[in-house]
Image (cartoon, rainbow, N blue to C red):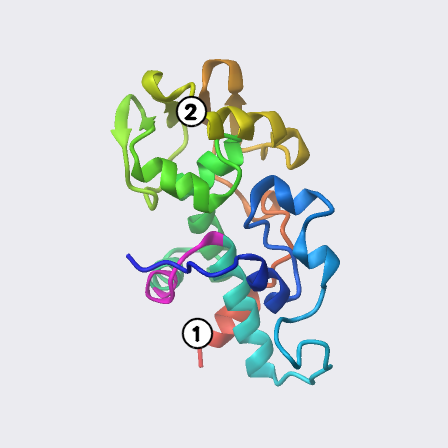
Amino acid sequence: MARYTEAKCRLCRREGQKLFLKGDRCFTDKCSYERRPYAPGFAGKLRKKLTDYAVQLREKQRVRRMYGILEAQFRSYFKRAEAQKGVTGANLLILLERRLDNVIYRLGFANSRDQARQLVRHGLFTLNGRKANIPSLLVRPNDIVEVRETSRKVPVITEAQEVIARRGCPAWLESDGAAFKGVVKALPTREDIQFPINEQLIVELYSK
């Protein structure tokens, strides 16, 4: 599947918000958004009045880029969220949070979702004792995610565990770094997603 391969910091600057795409670097003074908090390009510093459509589009792009998902897949998640009971916007965010690559990132076994996706693709994790190499797998309550025995000395995993304290582990997950294991205690709720997102704008965009 195609992926964005250009400078990730440009995405944060374009969206006017930190998306935490570079892992621990985003918490340091090296963060490009901290040094240049304006959109990239010649007209990046110009103030522009956005239309309602542009505001909705930017919110959708912000969430899509944060989770590292392409447009077709993101729209598929929206349709699934729309078909479920409850609030569509909240359902959408919960589905994104349940992705295996996001769970591995949240548990502190990777510095970013992009890195977590790569580690999953390389087969470094198991889900309920079985090898899992599909980043889009959706976890369920009581699922157990573990680093495979042969992969526990991989440098990026040990480095990620050292910095998880900076972002913390959400309440719906339980991380045991010493055992290289994490447990899904419950499904996430909208309140568990602390990142400032206005999901109603995404619903309005796709409802046009």
Q: Secondary structure at mark 2?
A: loop
Q: Which mark is residue 154?
A: 2
What's the residue type where badge 1 is placed? Tyr
Residue 106, x across and y down, in percent: 52, 36
Task: Please report contact status of discs 2 and 1: CB closer than 8 Å, yes or no.
Answer: no
Could you tell whether 88 is left or right of 168 in the image? Answer: left
The disc, 2 or 1, on the residue closer to the chain's N-terminal end is: 2
Mark pair 2, 1: CA separation: 41 Å
Q: Secondary structure at mark 1?
A: helix
Q: Quadrant of the N terminus?
A: bottom left
Residue 205, x across and y down, in percent: 49, 76
What's the residue type where badge 2 is placed? Val
Mark in the foreground, 2 or 1:
2
Could you tell whether 96 is left or right of 21 in the image? Answer: left
Residue 172, x across and y down, in percent: 53, 33
Q: Which residue was labeled with disc 1? A: 206
At label 1, counting other C-alpha atoms closer than 10 Å, the crowd grade (few under 14, some 14-19, many 20 or more) is few
Give the residues drawn in magenta, as a range: 67-75
